[in-house]
Every structure is written in structure tokens, then in C-alpha cells.
Amino acid sequence: MTLSEIHSKCREIIVNEMFEGTYGGISVACRMYEVMTHGETCENCIGENFNQRLIRLIDNWFDRYNPGDDKDYYFENYVLLLYLFFERIEFVFNVINKGRKNKLFNDFYYHNFKALTKIAKWANFIKHSKEFLFTHWPTFYFEDETISKADDDVTIDTEFIFAHYNDKDKPSPTILENNAKVLVEMPNLVEMTQEFCKELNKFIDFVCKNEIVYLHLEKKSTIEDYYKATEETQVE
């Protein structure tokens, strides 16, 4: 696939999986808004914020950006955009499971968000490259591409990322220092997008179907008379 084809396919997946009906201003994230509001005067910012981020992903990334030939540039920017969803999901879990003391929430989190975790680790590599900074003109390619490799080439793939960029205590990849034979095997973005949508939907369902969760979040994110107060201010 060309980058343009990947770009179009990923957009199609997100629209089909994260929006109801034809693309518009309503994503499945609005379900969180609905479950945490009661009546027309309420406003919930969690549902709004996730909905807005999905809309901007379509409008500003997919519909306004035309990919060129730089695979690494495209990959880095797209992964960072998806990573922003992971950060917000992780924050929600930290709020509902303070100190990560609840084993049920921990198990659900670690067993159901493996693709988002993978995105987060690649984002960490992009943000904090460590010894990758000392490589000379690395070759970037997608994992489903076939390229020629030499025996002494060093391949940075997902396994390498988890070994060296999972957290600050992982061993530094000193093998990359002053190395001119480094390959970066980027994950298949179409598959990543499919898994991203599946897990984002799981998160939304988790919030909406667990009363103890959405009632706790509602206290922090819903203004009961938001629109009523706005209307009164406008009248005055």
C-alpha cells in the first residue's frame, strides 16, 4: 500500500467504527456524555472531549493532510495523535482506581488495552529516542514490506521497543550508538487503527456500562445546569 492508500483506509476504519451512521459531529464517545448527563441543561466534558478529539482526527489529520513519501514522518505524527487517546484513558483509570489498588480494574486495564499500550511505547520511542539519536540515516519500513537485510543490521521493531523504551529503567540501546546499519520496522498502521478502534470502544463501553464508574466520573465532569446558567447570563 502507498501512504495515501494507508491514509484513506485508516480514515475509513475510524469513521466506520467510531461514528454512528455517516460522518458528522456525533461519535460513539457521545455515549459517555449521555450516560453522565440528565436533561437538556446538563453538560459533560469527558464525552465532549473524546468526541472532539475524534472529530479533529478526521477533520485535521485525515481530511486536511496529504501524505507524501516520508514514511517515518507520517508514522510518527499518526502514532502521536493516537497516543493522546491513550493518555486520556490512562488518566481516567488513575482517577477511578487511585493508586492502582483495585485488582479488577487493573486486570481489565492490562488485558484489554494491549494495542493502546503498544502505541504508547512507540510514542515513547518517538519522544525519547535515547541512543537512536546517534544513528546514521536509519531505514524506515512497514512490517509487511519486504526489504533486504544484512547480518549485522540492527532492527528496531516492537519487541525492541518494549525491551528498551518500555520505561526509564529499561537498558539503554547502546548498540545504536554511531551505527549506520539501523532499520526501523514500523507496525502495520491499518491493523493498528483497527485495534485502536476496538480498544477505544471497549473503554467507552466500560465507562457506560459500569454505574460505579460513570457516577464517580460524573461528579468530576458534569455541570447540571450548564446551559440554563448560560441562557440566564445571555438574557441579562
Image (cartoon, rainbow, N blue to C red):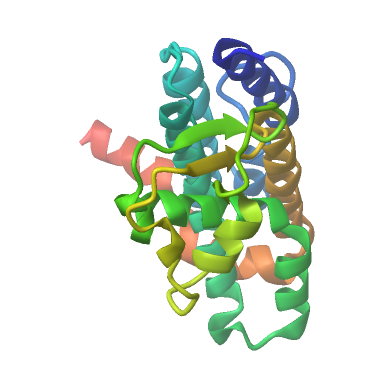
**Residue 19 in sight in this render:** no
Residues 207 and 138: in front is: 138
Question: Is residue 17 positioned above or below 223 on the image?
Answer: above
Question: Is residue 89 positioned above or below 33 on the image?
Answer: below
Quadrant of the snapshot with the N terminus: top right
Left/right of residue 142 with respect to residue 71 in the rendered view: right
Residues 81 and 49: in front is: 81
Residues 7 and 90: in front is: 7
Q: How many marks do you count on the picture?
A: 0
| Residue 207, image x, y percentages | 69, 58
Residue at the image point whose x is 42% and y is 15% from the top: 65
Question: Is residue 104 positioned above or below 44 on the image?
Answer: below
| Residue 224, image x, y percentages | 49, 54
Question: Is residue 88 positioned above or below 9 on the image?
Answer: below
Residue at the image point whose x is 55% and y is 63% from the top: 90
**Residue 13 in sight in this render:** yes
Location of residue 120 by image quarter:
bottom right
| Residue 107, image x, y percentages | 77, 75
Residue at the image point whose x is 71% and y is 57% from the top: 114
Quadrant of the snapshot with the C terminus: top left
Left/right of residue 130 with respect to residue 29 in the rendered view: left
Left/right of residue 88 with respect to residue 200 in the rendered view: left
